[in-house]
Image (cartoon, coloured by chain):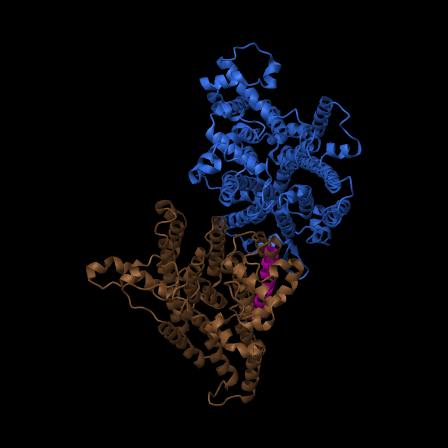
Chain colours: A blue, B brown
Amino acid sequence: MAPSTPSSHRPRKKRTIATPPGSNNSLIIHTSDTQQLPAFPLVSFLWAARAGVSQWLILPLTLMVVGLFRWAVSLWGYSGHNVPPMYGDFEAQRHWMEITSHLPMANWYLYDLQYWGLDYPPLTAYHSWLCGKIGAIFDPSWFALDTSRGIEGPDLKIYMRATVFVSEYLVFIPAVVTFLRRYTRMHGVHAWSASIALVAILLQPATILIDHGHFQFNTVMLGLVVASLDAILAGRMLWACIFFVGALGFKQMALYYAPVMFAYLLGVCVFPRIHVFRLLNIALVTLAAFALLLTPLLYGATSSQARELFASSPEPPLLQALSLSLDKKSLAYALLFQCTQVVHRIFPFARGLFEDKVANAWCAIHTFYKLHRFDASLLQRASLGATLASILVPCVVIFRHPRASLLLPAMSCVAWGFFLFSFQVHEKSVLLPLLPMTLSLASDGGLSKQNRAWIGWANILGCWTMYPLLNREELRMPYVVMTLLWAYLLGLPPTSFEILRSRTSSDIKPLEPHLLSKLIHLAFYAVMIGWHVIEALVPPPDGKPDLWVVLNALIGAAGFGLAYLWCMWKLIAQCRQIEACVADDDNRKKKQ
Amino acid sequence: MAELYPSLTQCAIVAAAFKVLLFPAYKSTDFEVHRNWLAITHSLPITEWYYEKTSEWTLDYPPFFAAFEWLMSQAAAWIDPAMLMVNNLNYDSWQTIYFQRSTVLVTELVLVYALSRFIKSSSLANKPAAHVASLSILLSPGLLIIDHIHFQYNGFMYGILILSLVLARKQLLASGFLFAALLCFKHIYLYLSLAYFVYLLRAYCLDPKNVLRPRVLNTIKLGICVVGVFAIAFGPFVDQLPQVKDRLFPFSRGLCHAYWAPNFWAIYSFVDRVLITVAPRLHLSINQEALSSVTRGLVGDTSFAILPEVTKEMTFGLTFIFQLIPLVKLWVRPDWDTFIGAITLCGYASFLFGWHVHEKAVLLIIIPFSLIALKDRRHFSAFRPLAVAGHVSLFPLLFTPAEFPLKTVYTTFWLVLFLFVFDRMVPVPERPRVFLFDRFSLLYLTLSIPLVLYCSIVHRLVFGSQRLQFLPLMFMSSYSALGVVGSWVGFMVVYFTT
């Protein structure tokens, strides 16, 4: 092996010193008398690790702490607890475990649709089947067909909570940990800073409150999305496709991210050179993954009982629209029936523009200008148009500049667009834009005041818009504790106003939030607190029982609009920065 | 000197957030006990406090604690007056739960204050160690399990004890005063009173240089303080002292508590149990009466089949003897470190040999020991098995499945974090270590993992939840007892050779 000359190493080292990417400036405050202070409480909890402590110690401890908080939240109420006859999401998930573990696959998407009929994609159904089968080992009565409807009990609650917990620790947590490791290494972020970001991300209150409080399996879908991002960072595009199809196959809400994934993967094949072979591969693998996802269901549709069942069931609207003339007992009919029925169940076009009070544009407009007067199909088209318009810019940017480091801002931007303008949005969907936004805490300068202020504000606002939901489910205390705890750890208002104060240190100026954004945040925090006070003390006026909830949605929609704009600005700024860097490098190369 | 992070306050805030989330967790009958006391002190005249017996959970703590309950009941009247009715047995509205759980949380501030005083009082070089030790006490899984899930007010009580121990560095009079007050809150601390007596007598009432020259003024001051505290506490009950005594010291209970505390008698019972199976071969006579009792090992009156019966007098004798031994050294060298060591050893002696010891009393050893565990590596070696055994032995207190992950994960977290940090911080000792002690303690540590797994999961899968119920408990307490006895012997050696 040729001895490397020391001279070849020196310039590289110098460059890293000249522009330290992983500087901990945003974590440590240097006071005048050379004393070092942690910038926010979370930093002080990992203060002892700043000299570098083995990940083998920090990671298990982190996972234990965040696990304890999750399990403690799960001791509280859940969606639909003690509310017959329909109960809530807890009963829905349990019911799916019940039907999938007892009925043949052909019946899954057909069985008694009025009572929590299965309306999630196949992977959720398979997951429910597994959970139901395992649960029946402990106590078969939990998932007995029909007789177990509305069953509640401490042991069942623990089992159901454990399924969420275990699913999260098998999917979301490993995905986030590996993603962050790769992402921070790519950005040259210090390992210490990465550990701090990991704690902040895993303690994100909205996700914990919805999955472990309200009861859902969002983290499985989000985890698959993060795994897909991780595969992209690792350069394994095909795995990225598979994971993303998995996410879509678990919960259709992953569609919020799909335009970015599509634009990125297409962009990778087109810029800087056109790779037809890569494009073909990606397309094939994606199709194969979808096929694999559906295979068990389609196989279930081939049996003679299944064919009879389908022949006697009403045709799904989509199949009617195709208007094929097939023998109702034929195999092709059975397969088509199964596919269209699944699609029909997953995408409920028949429902209205929005349900309940959601902090998005439609609900906000509806408050002042009733949208009932318009035809449903017109509203659908308006919604589609507005959504497309809102996601156009980020999709074009990511298509033209398919860079992994632009994915997070682009995804949050597009997800905000979907949340604000698309059809049938739930308040829980706010988790989707919040995830990529929160993940970017791990980027270079991600824990700077500016980033922390905006991301923290969006998260707290997101939790706040879910308060009416959490309030109904006796989750007030976990909401208060988890939100305030997260705000406290990240040094955010209302627990600390440090983030709004400027420090007279010249080198970290650019990462301070702008005065205008400080004012906006302050106003929003004041309004949120004021709203809580009013909601708790003043009963809504007669005839308008939902006034406070509507107010909440309106304020939330305004805030989310700002969050959308901020993500857009962030995306464009980062894109220009990267372009400038690349141009710089090119110039240097040309000179050499 | 830079500030130390995370600070005590920061940890207290995050811990408090976690503890609030535990409000709906399992609560033992102690919750009802304290609710009943709130009701008794609020609705009955003071003369009836120690006579009232509507509930089976009669008032059996000393008067200051009763007064403390009375004080809290004033606030409780605003929250939910229904909890203050004596006949309202097993009442647990959510207001009651929120109220009682938050009183535990609020009174724990005394512990936080005491720990901050402890950090301030230690010398500059010892500050980081004192800081870490304080955090370990504040975040102790023992306090979490017993106070915030099981339900008791130990954080408050140990706060007073630590404050008194800290004051014992310089302000001995205040220390004695506080300890007397603590005794009037909870009489379990009588177990530590001999060490206090010897220390205060030697260091405060007698001349440090000449044992035969008493300092009369100091003696009078201390006497007035202690007698005054007891007079204030028991004064209102002066005409019913025998009744108060009967309530505070109910001697009708058995040798071992419902769950065997991991002490010497647990090993004794275990040996007896093993002997039963080998007795026929050794031609030993078996006490048939003990053999046929089904509840052996689970409920109060343990009687032994082969080994001789244990009487109360024997347990008191043993406790007294093993308390006296370390006190001899305290008499000769009455400095603060020796005092804390003596307190710890008094805790050990009473826990290991006492009559009807609760597993919760293990805090009586762990908490004072934590204050000096970081002195050097030899202290730490003795502390390690105690930390594992003491906390593992608390697991049977919480038997509901929802709390299983909480107790195990929290304890594992605490053990991994603090044993690692302690290990990094402890200075190398001046004297060589005890031969092979470390190896054994490591082996012991690793054994706890399969044991906990067996007791909580495997046993139920193999034998079901009904058969051989006592087996996991017996394994657990024998294992823990081994650790506590081992660490006791180890610390004895360290104490006498330092």
Residue A304: quadrant of the picture: top left
Residue that extends furthest to the right in the rendered view of this protein: A368
Q: Nearer the viewer, residue A215 or B342?
A: A215
| Residue in view at x 73 percent, y 54 percent | A504
Question: What number of labels is visible?
Answer: 0
Answer left or right for B410 relative to B71. Answer: left
Q: Main secondary structure of the magenta part?
A: helix
- The residue range painted magenta reads B97-123
Q: Quadrant of the N terminus of chain A?
A: top left
Question: Where is residue B327 drawn, in percent x and y?
Answer: 43, 77
Question: Where is residue A92 drawn, in percent x and y?
Answer: 56, 34
Q: Nearer the viewer, residue B150 or A449?
A: B150
Question: Where is residue A202 drawn, in percent x and y?
Answer: 57, 45
Q: Is residue B2 visible?
A: no
Residue B109: quadrant of the picture: bottom right
Q: Is residue B455 magenta?
A: no
| Residue in view at x 50 percent, y 67 percent | B371
Question: Where is residue A98 drawn, in percent x and y?
Answer: 49, 33
Image height of B150 relative to B460, above or below: below
